[in-house]
Image (cartoon, helix red, strand yellow):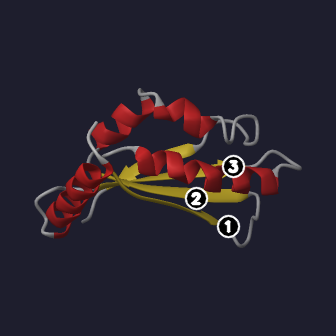
Amino acid sequence: MGTPQDKEEATASLIEDVLKGRTPVVTEIAIFTATPGNEEALGQGIIQGLEVFRQHPECISANATRCVERPGRYMLSVVWTSVEAHTHFRNGPLFPKWRKNINDLFEGSPEIFHYQPY
Protein backbone atom coordinates (compact mmCIF):
# COMPACT_ATOMS: atom_id res chain seq x y z
CA MET A 1 0.00 0.00 0.00
CA GLY A 2 3.04 2.23 -0.04
CA THR A 3 5.05 3.97 2.60
CA PRO A 4 3.61 6.25 5.27
CA GLN A 5 5.07 9.15 3.28
CA ASP A 6 3.15 8.02 0.17
CA LYS A 7 -0.07 7.95 2.20
CA GLU A 8 0.63 11.41 3.63
CA GLU A 9 1.26 12.80 0.14
CA ALA A 10 -1.93 11.19 -1.23
CA THR A 11 -3.92 12.57 1.71
CA ALA A 12 -2.47 16.06 1.20
CA SER A 13 -3.35 15.90 -2.51
CA LEU A 14 -6.90 14.77 -1.70
CA ILE A 15 -7.37 17.57 0.82
CA GLU A 16 -6.11 20.10 -1.73
CA ASP A 17 -8.61 18.77 -4.30
CA VAL A 18 -11.45 19.00 -1.78
CA LEU A 19 -10.53 22.54 -0.73
CA LYS A 20 -10.34 23.68 -4.35
CA GLY A 21 -13.73 22.11 -5.15
CA ARG A 22 -12.32 19.48 -7.52
CA THR A 23 -13.55 16.60 -5.34
CA PRO A 24 -17.11 16.71 -4.01
CA VAL A 25 -17.49 15.63 -0.43
CA VAL A 26 -20.30 13.84 1.37
CA THR A 27 -20.89 14.08 5.10
CA GLU A 28 -22.35 11.00 6.71
CA ILE A 29 -24.36 11.73 9.86
CA ALA A 30 -25.29 8.80 12.08
CA ILE A 31 -27.32 9.12 15.28
CA PHE A 32 -26.86 6.41 17.90
CA THR A 33 -28.95 6.01 21.06
CA ALA A 34 -27.37 4.04 23.89
CA THR A 35 -29.18 1.17 25.53
CA PRO A 36 -29.99 2.00 29.18
CA GLY A 37 -26.89 1.79 31.33
CA ASN A 38 -24.50 1.90 28.36
CA GLU A 39 -24.38 5.65 27.78
CA GLU A 40 -20.70 6.07 28.72
CA ALA A 41 -19.61 2.80 27.13
CA LEU A 42 -21.21 3.76 23.80
CA GLY A 43 -19.52 7.16 23.85
CA GLN A 44 -16.14 5.59 24.57
CA GLY A 45 -16.68 2.95 21.88
CA ILE A 46 -17.52 5.59 19.28
CA ILE A 47 -14.43 7.62 20.21
CA GLN A 48 -12.21 4.52 19.95
CA GLY A 49 -13.77 3.67 16.60
CA LEU A 50 -12.97 7.05 15.05
CA GLU A 51 -9.43 5.89 14.34
CA VAL A 52 -10.82 3.02 12.27
CA PHE A 53 -12.68 5.48 10.01
CA ARG A 54 -9.55 7.60 9.69
CA GLN A 55 -7.62 4.59 8.33
CA HIS A 56 -9.77 4.52 5.19
CA PRO A 57 -8.02 6.42 2.37
CA GLU A 58 -11.23 8.24 1.33
CA CYS A 59 -12.19 9.38 4.82
CA ILE A 60 -11.42 13.08 5.10
CA SER A 61 -12.41 13.47 8.76
CA ALA A 62 -14.36 11.74 11.51
CA ASN A 63 -15.67 13.07 14.81
CA ALA A 64 -18.42 12.49 17.33
CA THR A 65 -20.50 14.66 19.60
CA ARG A 66 -22.83 13.93 22.50
CA CYS A 67 -26.32 15.38 22.77
CA VAL A 68 -26.71 17.91 25.59
CA GLU A 69 -30.43 17.31 26.17
CA ARG A 70 -30.22 13.52 25.79
CA PRO A 71 -26.77 12.35 26.98
CA GLY A 72 -27.37 8.82 25.67
CA ARG A 73 -27.49 10.10 22.08
CA TYR A 74 -24.38 10.54 19.97
CA MET A 75 -23.86 12.05 16.53
CA LEU A 76 -21.14 10.56 14.38
CA SER A 77 -20.00 12.79 11.53
CA VAL A 78 -17.73 11.34 8.84
CA VAL A 79 -16.67 13.31 5.77
CA TRP A 80 -16.08 11.08 2.74
CA THR A 81 -14.90 11.82 -0.77
CA SER A 82 -18.21 10.30 -2.03
CA VAL A 83 -21.16 8.13 -1.05
CA GLU A 84 -19.35 5.31 -2.86
CA ALA A 85 -16.40 5.75 -0.50
CA HIS A 86 -18.74 5.20 2.45
CA THR A 87 -20.21 2.13 0.73
CA HIS A 88 -16.68 0.82 0.13
CA PHE A 89 -15.95 1.28 3.85
CA ARG A 90 -19.16 -0.53 4.87
CA ASN A 91 -18.37 -3.47 2.60
CA GLY A 92 -14.68 -3.66 3.49
CA PRO A 93 -12.54 -5.06 6.29
CA LEU A 94 -12.57 -1.87 8.39
CA PHE A 95 -16.34 -1.87 9.06
CA PRO A 96 -16.33 -4.89 11.42
CA LYS A 97 -13.39 -3.33 13.27
CA TRP A 98 -15.43 -0.14 13.75
CA ARG A 99 -18.59 -1.93 14.84
CA LYS A 100 -16.84 -4.19 17.39
CA ASN A 101 -16.33 -1.05 19.49
CA ILE A 102 -20.07 -0.39 19.80
CA ASN A 103 -21.91 -3.70 19.20
CA ASP A 104 -24.73 -4.29 21.70
CA LEU A 105 -24.36 -0.77 23.15
CA PHE A 106 -27.05 1.03 21.11
CA GLU A 107 -30.76 0.65 20.44
CA GLY A 108 -32.07 -0.56 17.09
CA SER A 109 -30.35 0.76 14.00
CA PRO A 110 -28.64 4.14 13.87
CA GLU A 111 -30.32 6.84 11.82
CA ILE A 112 -27.94 7.50 8.91
CA PHE A 113 -28.10 10.17 6.19
CA HIS A 114 -25.61 11.66 3.73
CA TYR A 115 -25.29 15.39 3.11
CA GLN A 116 -23.57 17.47 0.43
CA PRO A 117 -22.76 21.18 0.38
CA TYR A 118 -25.72 23.19 -0.90
Amino acid type indicated by mark 1: Cys
Seen as rendered, the residue at the extreme bottom is: 68
Q: Position of residue 89 (x, y in %)?
A: 40, 36
Residue 75: numbered disc: 2
Q: Position of residue 5 (x, y in %)?
A: 27, 54
Crowd band around label 1 with a 10 angstrom C-alpha radius: few (<14), some (14–19), many (20+): few
99 over 26 or under it: above or below = above
Amino acid type indicated by mark 2: Met
Q: Is residue 27 left or right of residue 31?
A: left
Residue under the image location 50 percent in, 34 percent down: 95
Residue 45: numbered disc: 3
Residue 6: numbered disc: none
Q: Are marks 2 and 1 in contact (CB under 8 Å)?
A: yes
Mark 3, secondary structure of its residue: helix
Distance in Å between CA atoms under marks 2 and 1: 7 Å
22 over 20 or under it: above or below = above
Distance in Å between CA atoms under marks 3 and 2: 13 Å
Residue under the image location 73 percent in, 71 percent down: 69
Distance in Å between CA atoms under marks 3 and 1: 16 Å
Mark 2, secondary structure of its residue: strand
Residue 67: numbered disc: 1
Crowd band around label 3 with a 10 angstrom C-alpha radius: few (<14), some (14–19), many (20+): some
12 over 82 or under it: above or below = below
Q: Is residue 44 left or right of residue 49?
A: right
Q: Are marks 3 and 1 in contact (CB under 8 Å)?
A: no
Which quadrant holds residue 17? bottom left
Mark 3 or mark 1, whichever is nearer to me: 3
Dot placed on the residue nearer the N-terminal end, 3 or 2 = 3
Amino acid type indicated by mark 3: Gly
Residue closer to the observer: 77 or 58? 58
